[in-house]
Amino acid sequence: MPGLYLVTTPIGNIKDLTPRALDAIKSCDVAFCEDTRVFKKLCSMLEVDLAGKHVNSFHDHSSEQKLSGIVELARTKKCLFLSDAGSPIISDPAYPLIQMCLTKGVELHSVPGVSSIVTALELSGLAPIPFHFHGFLARDKSKKNKDFDMIGNVYGTHIFFEGVSRVLKTIEDMSNLYPEFDFVVARELTKEFESVYRFKGRDFESVKADIVEKGEFVVLIHNPLKNESLMDEKLVDLAQDIMDHGPRPKTLSKLLAKITGENNKDIYKRLNLSK
């Protein structure tokens, strides 16, 4: 059947590929993948003959024209979209493609499989509801600090990816900010050297040396601090000040920061720029 098929591939163990995913690979007309070499290697391991199939690359820097071409091709052909590992919607460029398919009335199908997010959450032992997935944290320091602030202000389990060269520094910074929060570092999930480290923020230094700096990481942090009510005393005071004296930028920025968890100085700057 023609359409765009989002196929989730194994994140480390080839046996995790579902029968549906294998059937989709065998029966496709065209495959668009993050790295054609990785896909061809997977097919070789699965003993899938690619004769007569077109295998093309598609990544974050692919053009709008190429994206439109895929959508039009999916009207008449069975087109697969795959990442090197995991779901193509997680930290990969499938989202704009999905939006275009829906806008242009092209059939969209999901062929699900193993997710590093759910696998890490299962192994973590942390509360699963609510959980918040952030993808890769920003590299820019100011943006990264905003991520840190948000994690400290929003109740639940926060999940994010981090690169091997930055993971320990990121955890060190966050553990200093939130010493009472529960942390979990999941490394090389489903692979031979899978490792899961569980600790309180205050105990990071004692487990730091045990964390092997190789492979791929999923980091989880549980914020146990429920906001029983947004209408706490400080929030009411700020609202009353605005009612009494009008919406002054400084007071308004503090009120918005209290509600959103953002830095009030950043909000203040944006308010002044919008004048």
Image: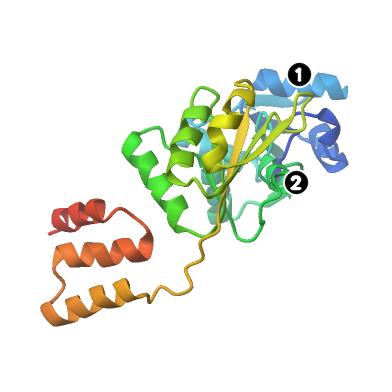
Tag 1 residue: 41
> Is residue 3 visible in the rendered structure shown here?
yes
Which sits earlier in the primary sequence, circle 2 or circle 1? 1
The image position of residue 271, as x and y in percent, is: 19, 58
The image position of residue 191, as x and y in percent, is: 77, 27
Circle 2: element type: loop
Tag 2 residue: 112
The foreground one among 118 and 184 is 184
Above or below, 66 against 180 in this view is: above
The image position of residue 98, as x and y in percent, is: 58, 48
148 sits to left or right of 96: left
Residue type highlighted by circle 2? Pro
The foreground one among 125 and 180 is 180
The residue that appears at 51% across and 61% down in the rendered structure is: 225
Q: Which mark is residue 211?
A: none
Label 1 packing within 10 angstroms: few (<14), some (14-19), many (20+):
few
